[in-house]
Amino acid sequence: MEWLIGGGFIMVPLLICSVLALAVIIERAINLRRDNILKPEIIQTIAAIHNPEDIPFAISKCEVISGPFSNLLRRILSNNHLTREEKFIDIQAAGRQEAKSLEKRLLVLEVITAIAPLLGLLGTVLGLEDIFGVISELGLGQAKAFSAGLAEAIRTTVFGLFIAIPSLVAYSYFDKKVGIFILEMEEYSMRILNKLYPAQDHNKR
């Protein structure tokens, strides 16, 4: 605790950044598990769709099971008056909407990754300013005081990097994970599309 206090008031926003980053990492680690996104019940529902008569049951399942995957499936199974091309465009629009829901809070990690090192650098610069003020009064003869002040000044930079590096790693990991989920959702969407428009799919072959 003394080490943190010695870094000055810049340590306060850095501590806030660290708490926010940790909270987002824990929340995303819990909610971005595969079974929470690509729920087995929805995958089983997709496999059970064989003809238009199965659509009402599939929609009812999607209304009970919440989540971006079920929202996308419900969107695909609705508006069946659309042509295949119109349906494909509608799926893309719905996919983008659901992708945003998966990416929520990742922006917080991205921002923290950017500002934490800058806050740390600002703290170091302010600390060096104080050191040079001491030097102007006491001269360079007080080497011990100078080295102690310099050590305190760089604490904010060290702490800022300590926050930014794990945040960057977590952001990259979760961003890649979301990308994989989106690709899999698109694959399942195309399977449903081929089931809804089998004649058109056969003619294209």
Image (cartoon, rainbow, N blue to C red):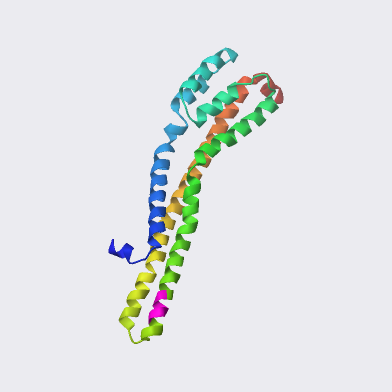
Residue 127, given in percent of the width and then of the height, sits at 40, 71
Which image quadrant: the N terminus? bottom left
Q: Residue at x 47, y 31 (%)?
A: 38
Q: Which residues are magenta?
A: 130-134
Magenta stretch secondary structure, dominant: helix
Q: Which residue is at the front of the view, 106 or 47?
A: 106
Is 147 above or below relative to 196?
A: below
Which image quadrant: the C terminus? top right
The total number of labels drawn is 0
Residue 119, given in percent of the width and then of the height, sits at 45, 62
The answer, for residue 160, to whether it is visible in the render is yes
Q: Which residue is at the front of the view, 147 or 126?
A: 126
Residue 148, given in percent of the width and then of the height, sits at 32, 75
Residue 84, given in percent of the width and then of the height, sits at 68, 25
Q: Quadrant of residue 145?
A: bottom left
Q: Is residue 81 left or right of residue 34?
A: right
Q: Residue at x 38, y 56 (%)?
A: 15
Q: Residue at x 54, y 39 (%)?
A: 100
Q: Is residue 131 magenta?
A: yes
Q: Is residue 172 magenta?
A: no
